[in-house]
Amino acid sequence: MSGIPAAGSVERKVAATRANPLHTPFHPKWYRRRVPIFWWLGKGAYAKFIVRELTSLAVAYTVLALLALIWALGRAEAAYERLLSWMSQPAVVALHALVFLALLYHTITWLNLAPRALVVRMGKRRVPDWVVVAVHYLAWAAASAIFLYWLLGV
Amino acid sequence: MARSNEPFFWALFSSGGMLSALLFPALAGVLLLALPLGWVALPTPELIARLGNPAVRIGLFVLAFLAIFHWAHRFRFTLYDGLQLYHLSALIAVICYGGATAVSLAAAWVLWTP
């Protein structure tokens, strides 16, 4: 028994390859390492990447909420009041706080990547990354201020 | 070589990402948190009057359209890479872009039905 290695064992495969050099137990080109579904939980940077990508759900939710508010405003006072009382439940407020944090994360990660997408030159010199980021943060502040003024008329 | 529609969706993703980055924290902070908690009150008659302005309707439609296509493109690749669903890539694309198209149509309906 000791002469023949067990079927499926590494020894048996090595012996098969030695007997026929063209033989291989695996397809040489199609081999791919299996990646587990939750690969991104293992490392902080991967988890941050997935959280950044998932902020798109908060963006989509905000679009739907905005449309619901516009719809209620265009209907009647009662529809608007009903929507507001639904939104003031503690569970909904908690969900909306989470949505708000996700939107902030989206904004910060998006603006911080701006220098990668936008290379600004002044004459021959490249404008430093921090200037590009700072201009984007100023634009964020200005856009927020204008929008709030438009919405609330303060 | 078949032409790719990737640059088209990427342009929507990118402009929607920028618009939502600049406007959505303020928008959600007021409409989803401060308003229901009673910290602010909306000038509702004025806002209803402003919604009658075609420029305001178009602006809101463009915001909703670009932001929802930003979601579609980003979420498509989140499912694709994050959950390793390579074999479902066509179905995922149809669901994401189809969903974004449906929301855009809903936005047009909400904004243009009196």
Image: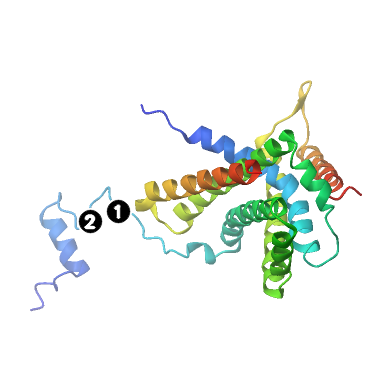
Mark 2: give few (<14), some (14-19) or many (20+) Cα within 10 Å.
few
Relative depth, front residue between B48 and B64: B48
**Which quarter shows the N terminus of chain A?**
bottom left
* Residue found at the very far top of the displayed protein: A123
Question: Residues at badges 2 and 1 in contact (C-beta under 8 Å)?
Answer: yes
Chain of the residue under label 1:
A
Residue B63 screen position, x and y as percent: 67, 42
Mark number, residue A74: none
Q: Amino acid at mark 2?
A: Phe
* Residue found at the very far right of the displayed protein: A154
Q: For the residue labelled by badge 1, is the local secondary structure a helix, a strand or a loop? A: loop
- Residue at the location (71% across, 74% down)? A90
Can residue A113 be seen from the camera position used here? Answer: no
- Residue at the location (48% across, 57% down)? B82
Direction from residue B107 to residue A137 in the image, left or right: right
Residue B78 screen position, x and y as percent: 51, 53
- Residue at the location (69% across, 55% down)? A72
Mark 1: give few (<14), some (14-19) or many (20+) Cα within 10 Å.
few
Q: Tag 1 or tag 2, which sits nearer the N-term? A: 2
Residue at image mark 1? A31
Chain of the residue under label 2:
A
Relative depth, front residue between B17 and A78: A78
Q: Quarter of the image holding residue B12?
A: top right
Q: Quarter of the image holding residue A134?
A: top right
Can residue B41 be seen from the camera position used here? Answer: yes
Q: Amino acid at mark 1?
A: Tyr
- Residue at the location (43% across, 32% down)? B4
Relative depth, front residue between B51 and A43: B51
Q: For the residue labelled by badge 2, is the local secondary structure a helix, a strand or a loop? A: loop
Q: Is residue A126 above or below residue B16?
A: above
Whole-Å distance between the Cαs marked 2 and 1? 7 Å
Residue at image mark 2? A26
